[in-house]
């Protein structure tokens, strides 16, 4: 992550991500679990990158996510 000052991590509860993936991508729960497990390593590496970290919780609807993103952007 050498070309940024801030890392924005958007997270959602496992069950919410599973529900969305099943609806959006037609994945099986097993395929989703495998994909989710593979991405854990990427997320963990972000915490040691030495950059400012901002976390946005994506557990609601699009409007809620948009409000959080705009709030963050206005603080820059």
Image (spheres, rainbow, N blue to C red):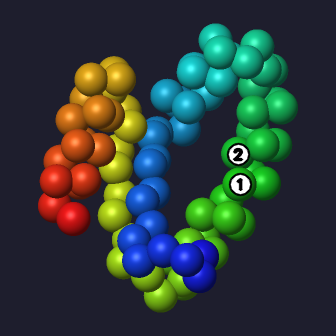
Left or right position of 72 against 52: left
The answer to whether residue 21 is left or right of residue 28 is left
Vertical placement of 39 versus 25: above or below? below
In the picture, the disc for residue 53 is none
Nearer the observer, 55 or 7: 7
Measured as percent of width and height from the top left, residue 24 is found at 65, 15
Left or right for 12, reference 67: right
Mark 2 neighbour class, 10 Å CA radius: few under 14, some 14 to 19, many 20 or more: some
Local crowd size for mark 1, using a 10 Å CA cut-off: few (<14), some (14–19), many (≥20): few
Residue beneath label 1, please?
Answer: 39
Camera-nearest residue between 62 and 29: 62
The image quadrant that residue 3 belongs to is bottom right
Q: Which residue is mark 2?
A: 36
**Which residue is located at x 18 percent, y 48 percent?**
71
At numbered mark 2, what does the secondary structure look like: helix, strand or loop? Answer: helix
Do the residues under discs 1 and 2 have CB atoms within 8 angstroms? yes
Expressed as whole percent of the image width and height from the top left, the position of residue 75 reads 16, 61
Q: Residue at x 78, y 43 (%)?
A: 35
Quadrant of the frame with the C terminus = bottom left
Location of residue 6 in the rendering, given as x and y in whole percent from the top left corner: 39, 71
Residue 63's place in the image compared with 3, above or below, is above
Q: Position of residue 45 (x, y in %)?
A: 63, 75
Picture quadrant where residue 48 is located: bottom right
Gap in angstroms between the C-alphas marked 1 and 2: 5 Å
- For the N terminus, give its image quadrant: bottom right
Q: Which one is nearer the viewer's eye here, 18 or 43?
A: 43
Instruction: Tell me what residue is drawn at x 29 percent, y 33 percent.
Output: 66
Label 1: element kind = helix
């Amino acid at each position: 992550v050498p070309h940024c000052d801030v890392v924005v991590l958007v997270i959602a509860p496992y069950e919410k991500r599973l529900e969305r993936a099943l609806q959006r991508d037609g994945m099986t729960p097993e395929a989703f679990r495998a994909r989710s497990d593979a991405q854990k390593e990427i997320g963990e590496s972000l915490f040691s990158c030495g950059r400012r970290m901002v976390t946005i919780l994506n557990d609601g609807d699009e409007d809620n996510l948009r409000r959080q993103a705009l709030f963050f952007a206005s603080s820059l």
